[in-house]
Image (cartoon, rainbow, N blue to C red):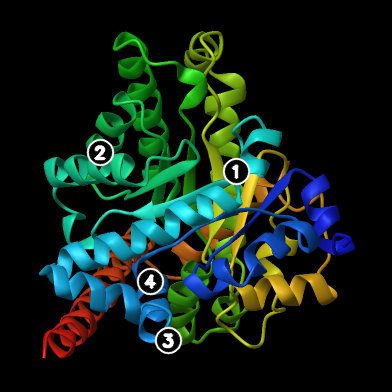
C-alpha cells in the first residue's frame, strides 16, 4: 500500500496528521492500522462526543457491557473500562509509529470527565488514574484549558504524565497554557522525571471561532463586516503560532529545559471540519501548514483533503501583522472578541458534558437491560 500523495505532502511539510475519531470497529477491523499506511495518520484524538457516538452505534460493545453488568459494575466504571480499553488498544496499534518517531507521534488521547472542567484537584486525580489504567507510554491525557485546568495541567505534567491541552480558543489563554507546560516541566525535573518522556500538544480550536464571529458579523450586516467573514479563525491560529515561536524558539526559558531533554509543546489545530458550506472543505487544513504542528481531522475532512486538498506552505509564518489587523477590524466593527472566546469556552465545556451525560444515560439503560 502507498500513502495518499496529498496527505504525504502535508506530512512532509511538518504537519502531523492525526485522526479525530476512534471506535472499537475502527481498531478491530484493521482500518486504523490501514490509515497509518495509506493516509499518513500518526495519531488519534478522542473526546466525549466521539465516545458517545461510538458506543451508541452498533453492537461492538454489547458483550463487554453485559459482562460488566454481570459483575455489578456501575455506569462510571463501565464507561471507564470500555473507553480505556479502546484507547489502550489504539495505543498498541500506533506503537510502531511512536517508536519510529522517537515518541513525537503515535499518540492517542483520552479526556478527563468533562464534569471536572472546573475542578483542579478532581482533574489531576483522574488524569493520574487514567494514566495508570491505560498504562501505555504513548498516551496523552486531555485536560481542558479552563482557569481551573491550567494548574491541573502543571500538576499532571509534574507527575511525569503527557498532556493534550484541549479547548483553547484565544491566544491569551494559549500563552497561559504554554506557561503551565513550562511550569510542569520545571516541577517534573525537580521530581526526578526524565523530561524526554513527557510530551504535550496544545489543541487550538479553529472552525468554531469563525462560526461564532461570522454570526456576529452577520448581525452587524455592513459591507465591512461581511468582508471579514471567514477570516478570524485562520488569523487567530496564525497569531497562536507566532506565540508558539516566541516561547519555544526565541525566549530564554525553554532552552534550559531543552538541554534536559524537554520537547516543545506543539500546536495542534483542532475543530478543523468546516462548518460553513460556503467555505472550502479543507480550508482549516490547507491553510494551516507550518513545521512542528499537528492537524487532527474528522474522517470526512481527511477524506476531502486526500481527494482535493492543497498544501500552502506560506499560510502561517510571517502573517502575524496581517492577522492582527483582521482582529483590529473585527473589534472596530463592534465585536467584543473577549466575549467571543468566553462564550466558545463555555459552550465547548457544555457540549462535552452534554455528550458525556448522554453516554451515561445510554449506558445506564444498557446495564439495566443486561441485569434484567
Question: If you read the primary sequence from the N terminus, does the residue marked by circle 1 or circle 3 appear first?
Answer: 1
Q: Nearer the viewer, mark 1 or mark 3?
A: 1
**Label 1 vs 2, first from the N-terminus:** 1
Q: Separation of disc 2 and disc 4 at Cα?
A: 20 Å
Determine whether label 1 and label 3 are within 8 Å by CB: no
Residue 51: mark in rendering: 4
Mark 4 and mark 1: Cα distance apart in space: 22 Å
Q: Quadrant of the C terminus?
A: bottom left
Q: Nearer the viewer, mark 1 or mark 2?
A: 1
Q: Are marks 2 and 3 in contact (CB under 8 Å)?
A: no
Quarter in which the N terminus is drawn: bottom right
Tell me if 184 is positioned left or right of 8 in this view: left
- Residue identified by numbered label 2: 128
CA distance separating discs 1 and 2? 21 Å
Instruction: Give the labeled residue for mark 3.
Output: 219
| Number of other residues with Cα within 10 Å of mark 3, as a class: few under 14, some 14 to 19, many 20 or more | few
Tag 3 or tag 2, which sits nearer the N-term? Answer: 2
Amino acid at each position: 500500500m502507498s500513502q495518499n500523495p496529498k496527505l504525504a505532502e502535508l506530512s512532509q511539510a511538518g504537519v502531523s496528521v492525526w485522526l479525530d475519531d476512534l471506535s472499537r470497529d475502527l481498531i478491530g477491523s484493521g482500518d486504523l492500522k490501514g490509515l497509518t499506511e495509506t493516509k499518513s495518520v500518526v495519531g488519534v484524538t478522542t473526546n466525549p462526543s466521539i465516545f458517545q457516538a461510538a458506543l451508541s452505534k452498533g453492537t461492538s460493545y454489547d458483550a463487554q457491557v453485559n459482562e460488566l453488568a454481570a459483575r455489578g459494575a456501575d455506569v462510571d466504571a463501565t464507561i471507564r473500562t470500555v473507553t480505556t480499553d479502546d484507547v489502550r488498544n489504539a495505543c498498541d496499534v500506533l506503537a510502531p509509529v511512536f517508536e519510529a518517531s522517537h515518541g513525537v507521534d503515535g499518540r492517542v488521547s483520552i479526556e478527563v470527565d468533562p464534569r471536572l472542567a472546573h475542578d483542579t484537584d478532581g482533574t489531576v486525580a483522574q488524569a493520574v488514574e487514567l494514566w495508570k489504567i491505560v498504562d501505555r507510554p504513548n498516551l496523552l491525557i486531555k485536560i481542558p484549558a479552563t482557569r481551573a485546568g491550567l494548574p491541573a495541567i502543571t500538576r499532571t505534567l509534574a507527575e511525569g504524565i503527557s498532556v493534550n491541552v484541549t479547548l483553547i480558543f484565544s491566544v491569551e489563554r494559549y500563552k497561559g497554557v504554554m506557561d503551565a507546560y513550562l511550569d510542569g516541566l520545571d516541577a517534573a525535573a525537580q521530581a526526578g522525571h526524565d523530561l524526554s518522556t513527557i510530551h504535550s500538544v496544545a489543541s487550538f480550536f479553529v472552525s468554531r471561532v469563525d462560526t461564532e464571529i461570522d454570526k456576529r458579523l452577520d448581525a452587524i450586516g455592513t459591507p465591512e463586516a461581511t468582508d471579514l467573514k471567514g477570516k478570524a479563525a485562520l488569523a487567530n491560529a496564525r497569531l497562536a503560532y507566532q506565540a508558539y515561536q516566541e516561547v519555544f524558539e526565541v525566549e530564554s526559558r525553554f532552552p534550559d529545559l531543552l538541554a534536559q531533554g524537554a520537547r516543545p509543546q506543539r500546536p495542534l489545530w483542532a475543530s478543523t471540519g468546516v462548518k460553513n458550506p460556503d467555505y472550502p472543505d479543507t480550508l482549516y487544513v490547507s491553510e494551516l501548514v507550518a513545521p512542528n504542528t499537528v492537524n487532527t481531522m474528522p474522517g470526512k475532512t481527511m477524506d476531502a483533503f486526500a481527494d482535493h486538498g492543497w498544501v500552502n506552505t506560506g499560510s502561517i509564518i510571517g502573517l502575524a501583522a496581517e492577522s492582527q489587523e483582521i482582529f483590529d477590524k473585527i473589534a472596530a466593527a463592534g465585536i467584543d472578541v473577549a466575549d467571543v472566546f468566553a462564550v466558545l469556552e463555555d459552550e465547548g465545556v457544555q457540549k462535552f458534558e452534554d455528550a458525556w451525560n448522554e453516554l451515561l444515560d445510554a449506558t445506564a439503560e444498557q446495564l439495566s437491560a443486561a441485569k434484567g
